[in-house]
Image (cartoon, grey):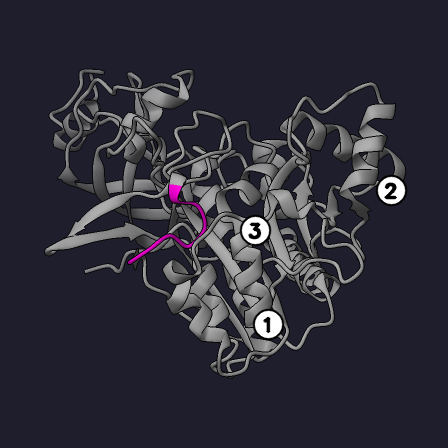
Amino acid sequence: MTERTLIKNLAASSDGPISVSGWVDTVRDQKKVQFVVLRDESGAVQLVHPRAFAEDGTAEPDALADVISGLAQGTFLTATGELKHDERVKLGGVEIKLDEIVVAAAANPETPIADDTGVDKRMDWRFLDLRQPKNNLIFRVQTTLEHAWRTYWVEHDFIEIHTPKLMASASESKAELFEVEYFEGKAYLAQSPQFFKQMAQPAGFGKVFEIAPAFRADPSFTSRHATEFTSVDSEISWIDSHEDVMRLHEELIVAGFTAVKEKHGEEILAAFGVEVTVPTTPFPRIPLAEAKRIVAERGYTVPRNDDDMDPEGERQIAAYVKETYGHEFVFLTDYASSIRPFYHMRHADDPGLTNSYDLVFNGVEISTGAQREHRVDVLVEQAKDKGLEPEELEFYLDFFRYGAPPHGGFGMGLSRVLMLMLHLPNLRETTYLFRGPTRLTP
């Protein structure tokens, strides 16, 4: 039996017997010759079968031709034949002259989606949608990006942790919790690993990271929200301020983008028309109050009753940074304590501000980071200021009653980073299986 060869390796293979497996992309069933474009997870190749004719020009019985004529798009099969290098073949400069086709699973002839089908219908048939080369590339880029981040962390002596996704109480906001039955009681799906990655600091781990699911019961239908998403988290000990966290964050971004550009830059340019730019460091840093002034000077007033920025404000400040610094990233820093969680450390000279930031990439917020408050007495008072009952936070406050180092970290949305890197309109495109307020399948 001839071993299966990945299509991407055919160009480097010698002419001769070869076997490939994949699914039918297109069939051209011509009078004298048949062509099949076969795809696998690595690429596409042209299969060719000249029809058999008698001396008088009549077609001879040809079982292989009959099989090819009956192939539907999406049929999975194994093809064996003779590999031939030919520069005239546009698809990779190689083709396979068929000897045999073995159908593993035939496809229905009518497919439910097409190239112009809307995103919601494509999500209904995601396994078909993911066959598209562009979508395959998205998740190869994701793999490279995550591997580069893990490599950075491991090479810098971080410890990988796996925090529980079932919790007894809220990690951040009770308003965005999914409640689930848990034996005789109730549990909640974790909104983030916040409390548990902080727990690693008094445990003496020093530097930790996690890439894992998180859940938000947020009934939003925007292009950048999901009810289940992959959160990229890191936390480090012995920091002086949120500046140390931002430095880690930008170094991690640079490591990931460098790897993606080196491995997939040309493919991304061909598929999406986007040139991946590795950002320079340091990233621009703008205090939020100053950012709001800049946005107002550009003719936009943030219409919020609180002290936060809104999506249009993020787009406006990103445009300013692009024009002024030629940069796709900007840290908005020093958020008001009124809109930050109780565990964010406040400025020593201005308790109305926090040692925190949002990272904005191409006009969209992808991450929040901060220095955490590690002094238990201060934590208790800040929780009270937020209207929280310290008694309900006892398990969390216990982390700090036996000593804790100054620490901080961030959480970042993986699908948002990919969406903005590839200039796609919706994170549904960069999520393997999207979950939103009205979607629980497939």
- Mark 2–mark 1 Cα distance, whole angstroms, equals 38 Å
Q: Where is the N terminus found, in terms of image quarters?
A: bottom left
Kind of residue indicated by mark 1: Arg
What residue appears at the point 47 percent right and 60 percent down from the top-left corner?
194
- Mark 2–mark 3 Cα distance, whole angstroms, equals 38 Å
Residue position for label 3: 385
User: Which of the two marks, 3 or 1, is nearer to us in this view?
Assistant: 3
What residue appears at the point 21 percent right and 17 percent down from the top-left corner?
110
Q: Where is the C terminus found, in terms of image quarters?
A: top left
Name the element at disc 3.
helix
Residue closest to the eye, 361 or 214: 214
Q: Which range of residues does the magenta coloring cover?
A: 168-174
- From this view, report whether residue 219 is shown above or below residue 93: above
Residue position for label 1: 375
Residue 102: image x %, image y %? 16, 42
Neighbourhood count class around disc 3 (C-alpha, 10 Å): few under 14, some 14–19, many 20 upward = few
Residue 113: image x %, image y %? 31, 20
What residue appears at the point 57 percent right and 80 percent down from the top-left corner?
157
